[in-house]
Image (cartoon, helix red, strand yellow):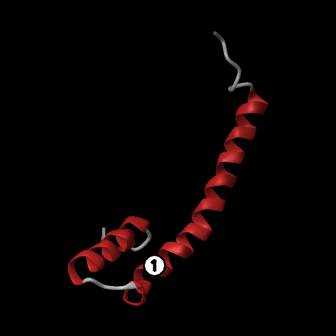
């Protein structure tokens, strides 16, 4: 699980929140938690939009988005 946690944004969000609340860390000290979140956001958001577009295109092409009621 520790290996999988390295690829989860929640890990870095919790780590940064914990450092800020318990230790009073500033932005300079939190950079090690902020940088992975920015990278993940830059990768995961466009990737998610692309996958959604693929699914939507498939559903339209196969008629799965038609309403029956």
Query: Horizontal placement of 33 versus 18: left or right?
Result: right
Give neighbour class at mark 1: few <14, some 14-19, many 20+ (Cα, 10 Å): some
Residue 8 appearing in the image: no
In the rendered image, the residue lying farthest to the right is 61
- Determine which residue is flagged by label 1: 34
| Quarter of the figure with the C terminus | top right
- Front residue (pair 25, 59): 25
The residue depicted at 70 percent of the width and 39 percent of the height is 56
| Quarter of the figure with the N terminus | bottom left
The residue depicted at 75 percent of the width and 29 percent of the height is 62
Q: Quadrant of residue 3?
A: bottom left
- In the image, residue 52 sits, relative to residue 67, either above or below, namely below
**Number of numbered tags placed on the structure image:** 1
The residue depicted at 21 percent of the width and 78 percent of the height is 22
Give the percent coordinates (x, y) of residue 26: 36, 85
Q: Quadrant of residue 45?
A: bottom right
Query: Horizontal placement of 39 versus 49: left or right?
Result: left
- Front residue (pair 41, 1): 41
- Front residue (pair 26, 63): 26
Give the percent coordinates (x, y) of residue 10: 38, 65
Residue 43 appearing in the image: yes
Q: Quadrant of residue 31?
A: bottom left
- In the image, residue 9 sits, relative to residue 50, either above or below, namely below
- In the image, residue 51 sits, relative to residue 19, either above or below, namely above
Give the percent coordinates (x, y) of residue 15: 31, 75
In the rendered image, the residue lying farthest to the top is 69
Give the percent coordinates (x, y) of residue 57: 75, 39
In the rendered image, the residue lying farthest to the left is 22
Could you tell me which secondary element the residue under label 1 belongs to?
helix
The residue depicted at 23 percent of the width and 83 percent of the height is 23
């Amino acid at each position: 699980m520790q290996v999988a946690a390295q690829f989860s944004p929640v890990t870095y969000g919790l780590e940064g929140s914990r450092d800020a609340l318990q230790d009073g860390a500033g932005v300079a000290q939190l950079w090690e938690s902020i940088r992975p979140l920015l990278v993940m956001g830059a990768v995961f958001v466009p990737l998610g939009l692309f996958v959604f577009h693929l699914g939507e295109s498939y559903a339209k092409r196969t008629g799965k988005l038609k309403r029956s009621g």
